[in-house]
Amino acid sequence: MGRLRSLLIPGVDQKLLVRDAVKIMPDLARRRFIAGGTSLGALTLLTGCNVSDSSTAENLLARISKFNDAVQATIFNPNALAPTFAESDITKPFPFNAYYELDEAPEIDGKDWKLEVRGLVDNKKSWTLDQLYALPQVTQITRHICVEGWSAIGSWTGTPLRDFLKLVGADTSAKYCWFQCADKDGYNSPLDMETALHPQTQMSFKFAGETLPRAYGFPMKIRVPTKLGFKNPKYVLSMEVTNEYKGGYWEDQGYNSFSGS
Amino acid sequence: MSSLAANDESSMSDAAKVIQPGWVRTVHWINAVAMIMMIMSGWQIYHASPFFAFRFSHAVTLGGWLGGALLWHFAAMWLLMVNGLVYLAIGLLTGRFRKKLLPLTPSGVLADTRAALTGKLAHDDLTKYNYVQKLLYAGIIVVGILIVLTGLSIWKPVQLQWLTALFGGYDVARVIHFSCMAAIVAFLVVHVALALLVPKSLRAMIIGR
């Protein structure tokens, strides 16, 4: 990078130069470049006209999305429970869904795995699976709603996240619980504290009464029935309590960050 | 002499006659823009999890991919909702809905439909709607309200779960939302075709008379 910088002509605005360079890239490369470089992925305005050409439209959409985050946080009722269903309503088979194929899903050895706890918590010790299994568990049968539009009803068993946050002495006045996961390309996602403290937000260890299978996030998934599916982290490695917005795998590509149901 | 005077008077009042007041024209065109953005981004969103075999051409979708389309959809929804509420409020308060759309009787609709199909339906006075127009304009207002409510119910199926339940649950609400879109697009085809066939109605929606 240092060498590259020295090659730049003095007086040339680097940002503008990069933007011009991006414009002449082939469409696909340009999209990927922009998806990696900015918070909003490939947006196409009308036919063949890329919004990235017009950063005004992109910025405006991003600002409205932030406004929508605020609106949703206001609408969010911490006491409103997601509807629950009977066991007979469970969708079978419950779909596997990810940005990769099932055979690319993380294969985690439960014996070696530990949940790392970081940030604004009193007790930063890591938790083994057996230690987590020993915590009191509850079961919920709720509807998983995907950002894509489909939905499926599933049964999840585990420990309410708010109980765990209390147990580790988390600063619940902090803004986010930020989860990092084992998915390829490093899935991560921020969960606002209000939602983290919702009674149905759960550290799930079982699906349909059986140990959480690999397809659904073994060894631990965060089940959030008040959020869209992409904000339900699977294959969780660590949780950080933080006031900083650290972004997320999908959020950075343009999915609305709050995405509440 | 007297007939000339009468003619003068009627042509004067014709010139002064505003068919579409300014507020109607304003909300109409804002609605047109918002609606088109909602429909085109909605088609892109539909592609992520389609419930029919068909897909919309990428040439007519907005957003490029699901994430982009959702940004457009959840931005344009504010324009659509706020503009729609302004329209409903002024329409009700000024009595325009009552004056233009009522009375709406089945016999009137039947008679005017028959007249329209046999080419006998006159439309020399653009300030007065025939019964077919009344039915379509009243109907599209109802569909407009329904598409916003079903949209809210699938956006917030937990916070607004009573609304989602009212529409028969999340999956059914999604299908109703889509069906309302189909009704609006069908309306749009007829509406635009007729506006082009009767250019003075289009002119009235642009300059008022």
Image (cartoon, helix red, strand yellow):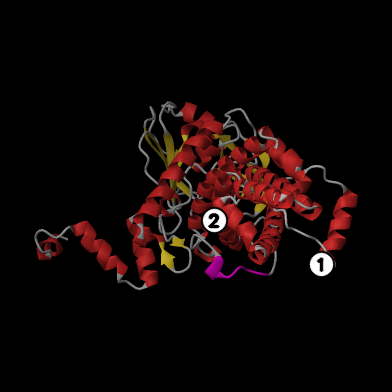
Residue lying at the far bottom of the rendered structure: A26
Amino acid at circle 2: Met
> Secondary structure under badge 2?
helix
Identify the subunit bearing mark 1: B
Give the percent coordinates (x, y) of residue B96.
69, 39
Give the percent coordinates (x, y) of residue A204.
57, 42
Q: Nearer the viewer, mark 1 or mark 2?
A: 1
Amino acid at circle 1: Gly
Residue lying at the far front of the rendered structure: B1
> Which residue sits at x=27%, y=62%?
A19
Q: Are there few (<14), some (14-19), or many (20+) residues within 10 Å of tag 2?
A: many
Highlighted range, magenta? B54-60
Q: Are there few (<14), some (14-19), or many (20+) residues within 10 Å of tag 1?
A: few
**A70 drawn magenta:** no
| Location of residue A87 (image quadrant) | top right
Residues tagged 1 and 2 counted as in contact (Cβ below 8 A): no
Give the percent coordinates (x, y) of residue A196.
51, 34
Q: Which residue is mark 1?
A: B119
| Location of residue B120 (image quadrant) | bottom right
Spatial distance from mark 1 to mark 2, Cα to Cα?
Answer: 35 Å
Give me the disc on residue B37: 2
Image quadrant in which the N terminus of chain A is located? bottom left
Give the percent coordinates (x, y) of residue B146.
70, 46
> Secondary structure under badge 1?
loop
Image quadrant in which the C terminus of chain A is located? top right
Please tell me whether residue A79 is drawn above or below residue A53 in the rendered image: above
Q: Is residue B95 left or right of residue B63?
A: right
Identify the subunit bearing mark 2: B
**B58 drawn magenta:** yes
